Image: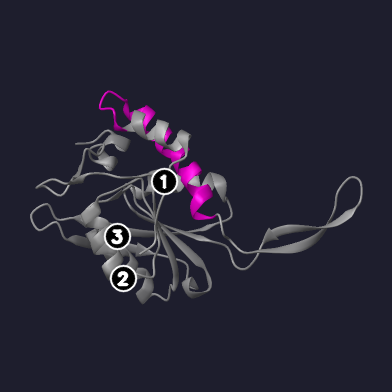
Amino acid sequence: MSVTVVNHPLVQHKLTIMRNKETSTAGFRRLLREISLLLGYEVTRDLELTTTRIETPLQPMDAPTLEGKKLVFASVLRAGNGLLEGLLDLVPAARVAHVGLYRDHDTLEAVEYFFKAPSDLGDRLVIVVDPMLATANSAIAAIDKLKSRGATNLRFLCLLAAPEGIARFTKAHPDVPVFTAAIDEKLNEKGYIVPGLGDAGDRMYGTK
Protein backbone atom coordinates (compact mmCIF):
# COMPACT_ATOMS: atom_id res chain seq x y z
CA MET A 1 0.00 0.00 0.00
CA SER A 2 1.23 3.49 -0.81
CA VAL A 3 0.58 6.08 1.89
CA THR A 4 2.64 9.27 2.10
CA VAL A 5 2.50 11.35 5.28
CA VAL A 6 3.57 14.92 4.49
CA ASN A 7 5.51 15.81 7.63
CA HIS A 8 6.78 19.21 6.50
CA PRO A 9 7.07 21.52 9.55
CA LEU A 10 4.75 24.14 8.04
CA VAL A 11 2.10 21.49 7.31
CA GLN A 12 2.27 20.16 10.85
CA HIS A 13 2.19 23.65 12.39
CA LYS A 14 -0.86 24.73 10.37
CA LEU A 15 -2.61 21.43 11.11
CA THR A 16 -2.17 22.00 14.86
CA ILE A 17 -3.88 25.39 14.62
CA MET A 18 -6.70 23.84 12.58
CA ARG A 19 -7.23 21.14 15.20
CA ASN A 20 -7.68 23.75 17.94
CA LYS A 21 -11.40 24.19 18.64
CA GLU A 22 -10.81 27.91 19.33
CA THR A 23 -9.74 28.55 15.71
CA SER A 24 -12.39 30.65 13.93
CA THR A 25 -14.27 29.67 10.78
CA ALA A 26 -12.35 32.29 8.80
CA GLY A 27 -9.05 31.10 10.24
CA PHE A 28 -9.85 27.45 9.54
CA ARG A 29 -10.80 28.21 5.96
CA ARG A 30 -7.64 30.23 5.35
CA LEU A 31 -5.41 27.56 6.88
CA LEU A 32 -7.06 24.81 4.83
CA ARG A 33 -6.31 26.74 1.67
CA GLU A 34 -2.70 27.29 2.77
CA ILE A 35 -2.11 23.69 3.82
CA SER A 36 -3.62 22.35 0.59
CA LEU A 37 -1.05 24.37 -1.35
CA LEU A 38 1.74 22.67 0.62
CA LEU A 39 0.16 19.22 0.26
CA GLY A 40 -0.21 19.93 -3.44
CA TYR A 41 3.57 20.16 -3.82
CA GLU A 42 3.90 16.59 -2.58
CA VAL A 43 1.05 15.01 -4.52
CA THR A 44 2.39 16.56 -7.78
CA ARG A 45 6.09 15.98 -7.03
CA ASP A 46 6.65 13.36 -9.76
CA LEU A 47 4.64 14.86 -12.60
CA GLU A 48 6.26 14.15 -15.96
CA LEU A 49 8.15 16.95 -17.67
CA THR A 50 9.13 17.68 -21.22
CA THR A 51 10.96 20.69 -22.65
CA THR A 52 9.89 23.64 -24.70
CA ARG A 53 11.96 26.19 -26.59
CA ILE A 54 11.78 29.68 -25.08
CA GLU A 55 13.82 32.86 -25.16
CA THR A 56 14.98 34.41 -21.93
CA PRO A 57 15.99 38.10 -22.00
CA LEU A 58 19.54 36.82 -22.62
CA GLN A 59 19.30 33.82 -24.96
CA PRO A 60 17.16 30.91 -26.24
CA MET A 61 16.96 27.74 -24.14
CA ASP A 62 15.12 24.43 -23.80
CA ALA A 63 13.18 24.77 -20.54
CA PRO A 64 11.12 22.22 -18.57
CA THR A 65 7.34 22.25 -18.80
CA LEU A 66 4.61 19.81 -17.76
CA GLU A 67 3.96 17.00 -20.24
CA GLY A 68 0.61 15.66 -21.31
CA LYS A 69 -2.93 16.83 -20.71
CA LYS A 70 -3.84 19.01 -17.77
CA LEU A 71 -4.52 17.59 -14.32
CA VAL A 72 -7.98 17.01 -12.93
CA PHE A 73 -8.73 17.85 -9.32
CA ALA A 74 -11.81 15.91 -8.21
CA SER A 75 -13.45 17.47 -5.18
CA VAL A 76 -15.64 15.31 -2.93
CA LEU A 77 -18.35 17.81 -2.01
CA ARG A 78 -18.68 19.77 0.07
CA ALA A 79 -15.59 19.71 2.27
CA GLY A 80 -13.28 18.85 -0.64
CA ASN A 81 -13.75 22.38 -1.99
CA GLY A 82 -11.60 23.72 0.84
CA LEU A 83 -8.61 21.75 -0.46
CA LEU A 84 -9.56 22.46 -4.07
CA GLU A 85 -9.07 26.23 -3.74
CA GLY A 86 -5.45 25.95 -2.65
CA LEU A 87 -4.66 23.38 -5.32
CA LEU A 88 -6.08 25.65 -8.01
CA ASP A 89 -3.80 28.41 -6.71
CA LEU A 90 -0.95 25.99 -7.38
CA VAL A 91 -2.20 24.68 -10.77
CA PRO A 92 -4.64 27.29 -12.15
CA ALA A 93 -5.05 25.50 -15.50
CA ALA A 94 -6.22 22.20 -13.97
CA ARG A 95 -9.64 20.83 -14.84
CA VAL A 96 -12.10 20.22 -12.02
CA ALA A 97 -14.51 17.37 -11.30
CA HIS A 98 -17.16 17.48 -8.57
CA VAL A 99 -18.39 14.35 -6.80
CA GLY A 100 -21.37 15.06 -4.55
CA LEU A 101 -21.56 12.55 -1.70
CA TYR A 102 -23.05 12.76 1.76
CA ARG A 103 -22.70 10.33 4.64
CA ASP A 104 -25.86 8.69 5.91
CA HIS A 105 -25.52 9.23 9.65
CA ASP A 106 -27.27 5.95 10.48
CA THR A 107 -25.45 3.59 8.13
CA LEU A 108 -22.31 5.75 7.57
CA GLU A 109 -22.57 4.78 3.88
CA ALA A 110 -21.91 7.32 1.11
CA VAL A 111 -24.91 8.50 -0.91
CA GLU A 112 -24.26 10.16 -4.28
CA TYR A 113 -26.28 13.24 -5.27
CA PHE A 114 -24.12 14.96 -7.93
CA PHE A 115 -21.38 14.13 -10.44
CA LYS A 116 -19.76 16.32 -13.09
CA ALA A 117 -16.35 15.70 -14.64
CA PRO A 118 -14.30 16.29 -17.81
CA SER A 119 -15.05 13.69 -20.47
CA ASP A 120 -11.51 12.42 -21.09
CA LEU A 121 -10.56 11.28 -17.57
CA GLY A 122 -8.64 8.32 -18.95
CA ASP A 123 -6.03 10.64 -20.46
CA ARG A 124 -5.39 12.63 -17.27
CA LEU A 125 -3.98 12.32 -13.77
CA VAL A 126 -6.96 12.68 -11.42
CA ILE A 127 -6.23 13.89 -7.88
CA VAL A 128 -9.22 13.26 -5.59
CA VAL A 129 -9.47 15.64 -2.62
CA ASP A 130 -11.41 15.28 0.62
CA PRO A 131 -10.12 16.58 3.98
CA MET A 132 -10.96 13.44 5.98
CA LEU A 133 -10.32 9.75 5.25
CA ALA A 134 -12.44 8.36 8.11
CA THR A 135 -14.59 5.32 7.31
CA ALA A 136 -13.37 5.69 3.68
CA ASN A 137 -16.91 5.06 2.38
CA SER A 138 -17.06 8.40 0.56
CA ALA A 139 -13.51 8.12 -0.79
CA ILE A 140 -14.11 4.60 -2.11
CA ALA A 141 -17.43 5.63 -3.69
CA ALA A 142 -15.78 8.66 -5.34
CA ILE A 143 -12.95 6.54 -6.79
CA ASP A 144 -15.46 3.89 -7.94
CA LYS A 145 -17.42 6.57 -9.80
CA LEU A 146 -14.34 8.15 -11.40
CA LYS A 147 -13.03 4.76 -12.51
CA SER A 148 -16.43 3.93 -14.03
CA ARG A 149 -16.06 7.12 -16.09
CA GLY A 150 -12.67 6.05 -17.41
CA ALA A 151 -10.11 7.35 -14.89
CA THR A 152 -7.10 5.05 -14.55
CA ASN A 153 -4.40 7.26 -13.02
CA LEU A 154 -5.66 8.46 -9.63
CA ARG A 155 -4.29 9.77 -6.35
CA PHE A 156 -6.16 10.57 -3.14
CA LEU A 157 -5.25 13.64 -1.07
CA CYS A 158 -6.61 14.28 2.42
CA LEU A 159 -5.76 16.29 5.49
CA LEU A 160 -6.33 13.59 8.11
CA ALA A 161 -6.68 9.81 7.89
CA ALA A 162 -7.73 7.12 10.34
CA PRO A 163 -5.97 3.72 10.30
CA GLU A 164 -9.33 2.02 9.68
CA GLY A 165 -10.00 4.28 6.68
CA ILE A 166 -6.57 3.67 5.18
CA ALA A 167 -7.01 -0.10 5.55
CA ARG A 168 -10.43 -0.11 3.87
CA PHE A 169 -9.39 2.32 1.12
CA THR A 170 -6.18 0.52 0.17
CA LYS A 171 -8.02 -2.82 0.12
CA ALA A 172 -10.68 -1.41 -2.23
CA HIS A 173 -8.27 0.58 -4.41
CA PRO A 174 -4.69 -0.70 -3.95
CA ASP A 175 -3.65 1.13 -7.14
CA VAL A 176 -4.49 4.59 -5.73
CA PRO A 177 -1.77 6.16 -3.54
CA VAL A 178 -2.85 8.18 -0.51
CA PHE A 179 -1.29 11.48 0.58
CA THR A 180 -2.15 12.93 4.01
CA ALA A 181 -0.83 15.37 6.60
CA ALA A 182 -1.41 12.97 9.52
CA ILE A 183 -2.65 9.52 10.45
CA ASP A 184 -4.62 9.86 13.67
CA GLU A 185 -5.35 7.33 16.41
CA LYS A 186 -8.71 5.80 15.47
CA LEU A 187 -12.38 6.30 14.59
CA ASN A 188 -14.94 6.83 17.35
CA GLU A 189 -18.32 5.07 17.48
CA LYS A 190 -19.84 7.80 15.26
CA GLY A 191 -17.23 7.34 12.54
CA TYR A 192 -15.29 10.53 13.33
CA ILE A 193 -11.49 10.67 13.37
CA VAL A 194 -10.00 10.97 16.90
CA PRO A 195 -8.36 13.24 18.01
CA GLY A 196 -9.14 14.78 14.60
CA LEU A 197 -10.43 18.32 14.15
CA GLY A 198 -14.20 17.84 14.14
CA ASP A 199 -16.33 18.01 10.99
CA ALA A 200 -14.21 19.73 8.33
CA GLY A 201 -17.24 20.96 6.35
CA ASP A 202 -18.92 22.44 9.43
CA ARG A 203 -15.73 24.14 10.58
CA MET A 204 -15.04 25.52 7.11
CA TYR A 205 -18.51 26.90 6.50
CA GLY A 206 -19.64 27.67 10.04
CA THR A 207 -22.53 25.19 9.97
CA LYS A 208 -23.71 22.54 12.42
When the figure is inspected, residue 160 is found, relative to residue 150, above or below; the finding is above
Q: Which mark is residue 139?
A: 3
Q: CA distance from mark 2 to mark 1?
A: 21 Å
Mark nearer the N terminus (1 vs 3)? 1
Q: Is residue 96 above or below residue 14?
A: below
Disc 2 marks a residue whose amino acid type is Asp
Q: Which residue is mark 2?
A: 144
Q: Circle 1 sits on which residue?
A: 83
Residue 63 pos. (x, y %): 77, 57
**Quadrant in which the C terminus is drawn:** top left
Disc 3 residue crowd, few under 14, some 14–19, many 20+, Cα 10 Å: many
| Residue 30 is one of the magenta-drawn residues | yes
Left or right of 54 on screen, residue 171: left
Q: Earlier in the sequence, mark 2 or mark 1?
A: 1
Q: Is residue 208 magenta?
A: no
C-alpha distance separating marks 2 and 3: 9 Å
Q: Secondary structure at mark 2?
A: helix
The image shows residue 125 at horizontal and vertical percentages of 50, 65
